[in-house]
Image: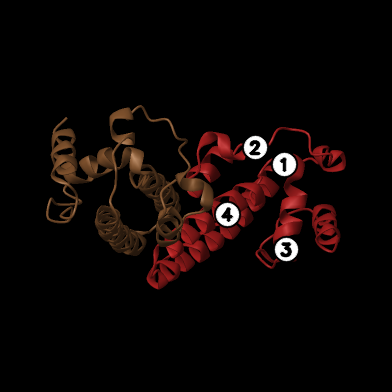
Chain colours: A red, B brown
């Protein structure tokens, strides 16, 4: 578990258990990566930024959906949608260093982070993240 | 299962499985009640009315809650609240004739139906419902 997991969980509004995916994801090449203090800070900043954007978008859409509620089925659709959003965020924002390259690759592919957001990471990491984002 | 279960489920926006509580609730005294066509219609009308009020109140509160959302934790509180509302409605609006006296007693106790709403039921049923509402 990374040093900023508790902070991100708090930002997410998620419980302690939400991000505990276990330790084995098969990205053994990345588990061995060394993270300098500067890189850890850059990674934390980028992930915080993406999470802030994600949460702001979900809050905005929740308000719009609520405005459109007319009947009971709309209520339960909103319930299901909120569950999906929470589970999606918990799944996407997996901030263990061992899987962070895959996390950033997914966010990059979905244009939720940019390479500019990731400045501060070593070129080797950026190259791997960019390559993974195309797979 | 009562003859209007499907209709009420549709109104509720709930799936087929939501109201299937099984058949044994221990209210054997009420299982034996006879329901005339007029009483069935009165029960349906009263239950529909209470459900309409309940759903309108939940929709109103959902919109107010959404307006107050400021951060992620508010989103997940709304998710939990919606789950509670759906489960509460599914639990309360159990429209099998065998448990309907208890259902109306609960609604009467919580002022979600009035004795006026229940006009059309036989006096024996009204007396039982009123007595149960005080227990």
Q: Chain of mark 2?
A: A
C-alpha span from label 1 to label 4:
25 Å
Q: Which residue is mark 3?
A: A108
Q: Chain of mark 3?
A: A
The secondary structure type at the circle numbered 3 is: helix
The secondary structure type at the circle numbered 4 is: helix
Which numbered disc flags the more N-terminal residue, 4 or 2? Answer: 2
Pointer 3 with pointer 1, Cβ within 8 A: no
Which numbered disc flags the more N-terminal residue, 2 or 3? Answer: 2
Which numbered disc flags the more N-terminal residue, 3 or 1? Answer: 1
Q: Is residue A5 left or right of A69 when viewed as pictured?
A: right
Closer to the eye: label 4 or 2: 4
Pointer 1 with pointer 2, Cβ within 8 A: yes
Label number found at residue A84: 4
Q: Which quadrant would the N terminus of chain B be assigned to in this image?
A: top left
Query: Are the numbered discs 3 and 1 placed on the same chain, yes or no?
Result: yes
Query: Are the numbered discs 4 and 2 placed on the same chain, yes or no?
Result: yes
Percent coordinates x, y for residue B114 in the rendering:
14, 52
Closer to the eye: label 1 or 4: 4
Pointer 4 with pointer 2, Cβ within 8 A: no
């Amino acid at each position: 578990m990374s040093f900023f997991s508790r902070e991100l969980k708090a930002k997410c509004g998620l419980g302690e258990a939400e991000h505990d995916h276990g330790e084995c994801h098969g990205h053994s090449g990345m588990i061995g990566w060394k993270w300098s203090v500067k890189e850890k800070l850059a990674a934390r900043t980028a992930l915080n930024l993406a999470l802030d954007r994600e949460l702001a978008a979900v809050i905005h859409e929740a308000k719009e959906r609520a405005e459109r509620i007319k009947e009971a089925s709309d209520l339960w659709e909103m319930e299901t949608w909120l569950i999906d959003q929470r589970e999606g965020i918990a799944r996407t924002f997996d901030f263990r260093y061992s899987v962070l390259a895959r996390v950033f690759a997914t966010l990059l592919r979905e244009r939720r982070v940019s390479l500019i957001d990731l400045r501060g990471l070593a070129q080797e990491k950026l190259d791997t993240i960019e390559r993974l984002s195309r797979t």
